Image: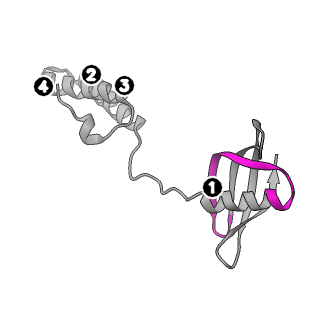
Amino acid sequence: MLAFSTEMNFANPTQSRYLDYLIFLIIQRGFAMNRRQSAFALVCLLGATGLHGCGAPTPTVDDAPFRTAIADYLRINNMALKVKAIKTGPVVDGEQASLSASLTHEQLGGPSVTWTFQFAKQPTGDWRVTMHED
């Protein structure tokens, strides 16, 4: 069997094995397939490659400045919370940004809540939390 998945660098081994099998069938059967089978194989192949995404990966934004801004915001407002995990984002739109974070008690841990934070970029280049929604 041909091993195309190592060249394509697919993350999901099950889907890459499926894609390898489709490519193998197309190459092995080649011209022995009729038009309907060829069209079906092509649609399956295109659909399988679509599951893996196309193009270059989207650039990720470093969340460290946002974590620092959230920590400062929580400390200044005496909330006794800390960031447990970033759920979504940060999404930067010019001088504004937002992200959703899971927060837990600063010292005890335990259950967490998810808040959405809004940020504004300061003249120094740092980010500051302007508001949160729980």
Look at mark 3 in the image and give the residue it sits on. 14
**Residue sitting at 87 percent across and 56 percent down?**
78
**Residue sitting at 43 percent across and 51 percent down?**
57
The reply to whether callout 2 and callout 3 are in contact (CB within 8 Å) is: no
C-alpha distance separating marks 2 and 3: 26 Å
| Looking at the image, residue 121 lies above or below residue 17 | below
Way the structure is coloured: one colour
| Looking at the image, residue 41 lies above or below residue 102 | above
| Looking at the image, residue 35 lies above or below residue 124 | above
Look at mark 1 in the image and give the residue it sits on. 90
C-alpha distance separating marks 2 and 4: 12 Å
Farthest residue to the right: give it. 78
What amino acid type is highlighted by mark number 1? Pro
Q: Quadrant of the C terminus?
A: top right
Q: Is residue 49 left or right of residue 87?
A: left
Disc nearest the viewer among 2 and 4: 4
Disc nearest the viewer among 3 and 4: 3
Residue 101 highlighted magenta (yes or no): no
What amino acid type is highlighted by mark number 4? Phe
Give the crowd class for mark 4: few <14, some 14-19, many >=20 residues within 10 Å. Answer: few
Q: Which residues are magenta?
A: 74-96
